[in-house]
Image (cartoon, rainbow, N blue to C red):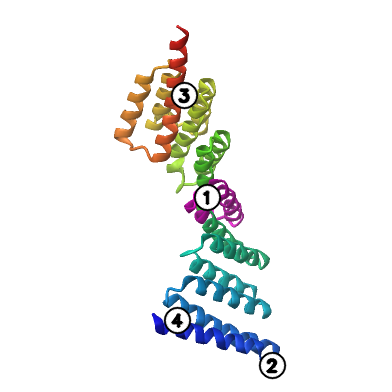
Amino acid sequence: MGDQLARAEDFEKKAEKKLNSWGLFGSKYEDAADLYEKAANSYKLAKSWDKAGSTYVKLANCHLKLDSKHEAAQAYVEASHSYKKTTVNEAISCLEQAVNFFCDIGRLSMAARYYKEIAELYESEQNIEKAIEFYDKAADFFQGEDVTTSANQCKQKVAQFAAQLEQYQKAIKIYEEIAQHSLGNNLLKYGVKGHLLNAGICQLCRGDVVAITNALERYQELDPTFSGTREYRFLADIAAAIDEEDITKFTDVVKEFDSMTPLDSWKTTLLLRVKEKLKAKEQEEDDLT
């Protein structure tokens, strides 16, 4: 480990000496870039992540002097992956620089990939608003490059977080759009009932029984097979329990569905919100009587 650190520091000193020397404009930066790359790799081997990150940024600057934006972008990606071990904000900043260069040279699928990575970093930091922003950007770029599966994955993340933030209408719109687009694709159409279930749960959170009933009718028109699914029956039974203000029925319906198709934590959280509203309504009516 100590040997690698000494090697890294030596390569970095040589790179800086090269930059400060006289010589042909191009070759000076090429030589320095080669030395910075060796230094950064050695810092990585020494697990000196911050130094590796800062050295990759110096490498990126050399590539920019050589007018090579693609290599500069890749160096910023490497810097980000090193900083990720210690400083998430620096990692995000480097990826944003990389994305800017990938956009400049028309590598939009690469830009999409790293927008998604930025979103994941914000998600790991529990910064949901920022995660939504960058998953949205990634989805737009993936869609523009016809990478439908990745676009849908990012859109689903946006919908998931929007619902967590009680932005139910936004989530519903996304899930319904994904369901609609998936119907025409043989590989994706099997996921339609899941998207409609998610949209329906968001409808339940809004607490408008008429809207839920209308939504279920629309979903049947969208996909005539949906009315024969367990997901449809679940939503319809929950809507009936809400309409009847019957907490016991609500609980039984959820338990039965969960025993056949286990509910993930996102669905469980939203259904608990629905149950709490139902309880509050029941309590309110008890207080009035």
In which image quadrant can residue 279 be found? top left
User: Residue 136 or 50: which is nearer the viewer?
Assistant: 50
Does 81 sit above or below residue 277?
Answer: below
Query: What is the spatial separation of the Cα atoms under label 1 and label 4, in whole angstroms?
Result: 39 Å
- Mark 3 closeness class: few <14, some 14–19, many ≥20 residues within 10 Å: some
Residue 154's tag is: 1
Task: Single out the residue that lies furthest toward the bottom.
Answer: 23
In which image quadrant can residue 240 be found? top left
Q: Earlier in the sequence, mark 1 or mark 4?
A: 4
Amino acid marked by disc 2: Trp
Q: Give the main secondary structure, helix, strand or loop, of the magenta stretch.
A: helix
Q: Which residue is mark 4?
A: 5
Asked if residue 254 lies left or right of residue 23, the reply is left
- Mark 4 closeness class: few <14, some 14–19, many ≥20 residues within 10 Å: many
Q: Which quadrant: the C terminus?
A: top left
- Mark in front: 2 vs 4: 4
Amino acid marked by disc 3: Lys
Q: Which residue is mark 2?
A: 22
| Magenta residue check for 147 | yes
Does 268 sit above or below residue 150?
Answer: above
**In the image, which residues are magenta?**
120-149
